[in-house]
Image: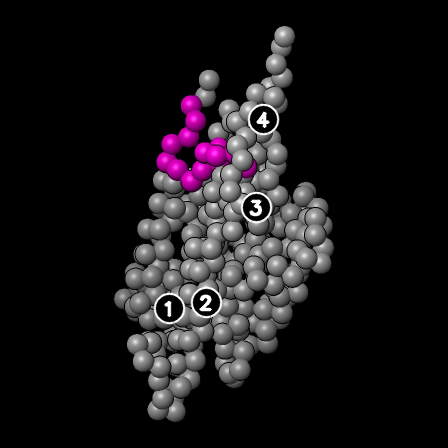
Amino acid sequence: MAIKTSEVNTAHAVKKPKKSGQWYRSAIQIFFFSLVALITINVILAKYGWSIPFLSTASLHAICPFGGIVSIYNFAALGTFVQKIHSSSFILMLTAILLAVFFGPVICGWICPLGTFQEWISKIGKKIFKKRFNNFIPLKLDRYLRYIRYISLILVVYFTATTARLVFQTYDPYFALFNFWSGEVAIAAYIFLGASIVLSFFTERPYCKYICPYGALLGIFNLFRIFKIRRKASTCIDCKKCDNTCPMNITVSKARTVYSHQCISCMKCTSEYSCPVAATVEFSTKGEKKA
């Protein structure tokens, strides 16, 4: 008697202990969000002669790796940084690129405070809209909207290089989030932050998906990074849980290896988190050999 493929695949499904979620990823996100918040507060305290022990008084720009990216032209041509950018941004930039070469945009998925903030808001949206959440935008439109962030990247780098000023600060919701009480935030940055907050109730990481120039740059590394998200077709039961749990709406269930420029290496699609079959969706260097 012939055995159906689905029955063979189902045989690979094993009951695993109930998962408590990626607590280690959440812990890292909370740590970096708190660290950036405390450093920002410490800068303000330093103006009044106070400080938090063991914390840097560097500006928010000095601890942002994207500052190094937009300063490359000025540094190469003139040997100077653009306004408000510190040498530490270059060190962070090189560290972020090295991480991206090995693991992809882990800065986006594990460290970026703005990405974390959007995720926290989205938890409320998920409870309100349930299955509709993260599915409001038609796929055909969504496919094109995702390339806006590359236009954003080109414009930011160009105008920063030609003006030697940190142009992006005017529109940066990350800067607005941690400086909303100061007088340094432009109205446009508040608008971008407000839009990111509102849209996060309907879709996950809207700013990351459609606007973020730094995410656009790091996303390119998904094409050739060493560790990739890989799906083992021979044990996949086609349950679509990897697709449903992906915050960036990547169709993992149809790929042997995820090369999408939108992947943020959050690991939510893997067997460690959502896939019910052990060793089927993994973060590894080698994929399954084709039959």
Mark 3 nearby-residue class (10 Å; few <14, some 14–19, many ≥20): many
Residue 33: mark? 2
* Placement of 213 over or under 224, stated as above or below: below
Residue 10: mark? 4
* Placement of 25 over or under 256, stated as above or below: below
**Residue 257 in view (yes/no):** no
Mark 2 nearby-residue class (10 Å; few <14, some 14–19, many ≥20): some
Magenta: main secondary structure equals loop
Q: Earlier in the sequence, mark 4 or mark 1?
A: 4
Q: Quadrant of the N terminus?
A: top right
Q: For the residue marked with disc 3, what is the amino acid? A: Cys
Could you tell me residue 176's position as x and y percent?
Answer: 53, 73
* Placement of 216 over or under 234, stated as above or below: below
Could you tell me residue 178's position as x and y percent?
Answer: 49, 74
Element at label 4: helix
C-alpha separation, residue under disc 4 versus residue under disc 3: 22 Å
Q: For the residue marked with disc 2, what is the amino acid? A: Phe
Mark 2 touches mark 1? (CB < 8 Å): no
Q: Is residue 118 left or right of residue 154?
A: right
Could you tell me residue 230's position as x and y percent?
Answer: 46, 35
Which residue is the site of mark 3? Answer: 246
Q: Earlier in the sequence, mark 3 or mark 2?
A: 2
Foreground disc of the pair 4, 3: 4
Q: Earlier in the sequence, mark 2 or mark 1?
A: 2
Could you tell me residue 135's position as x and y percent?
Answer: 68, 48
Question: Which residue is most to the top?
Answer: 1
Q: Residue at x 49, y 71 (%)?
A: 175
Q: For the residue marked with disc 4, what is the amino acid? A: Thr
Magenta region: which residues? 276-289
Foreground disc of the pair 2, 1: 2
C-alpha separation, residue under disc 4 versus residue under disc 1: 48 Å
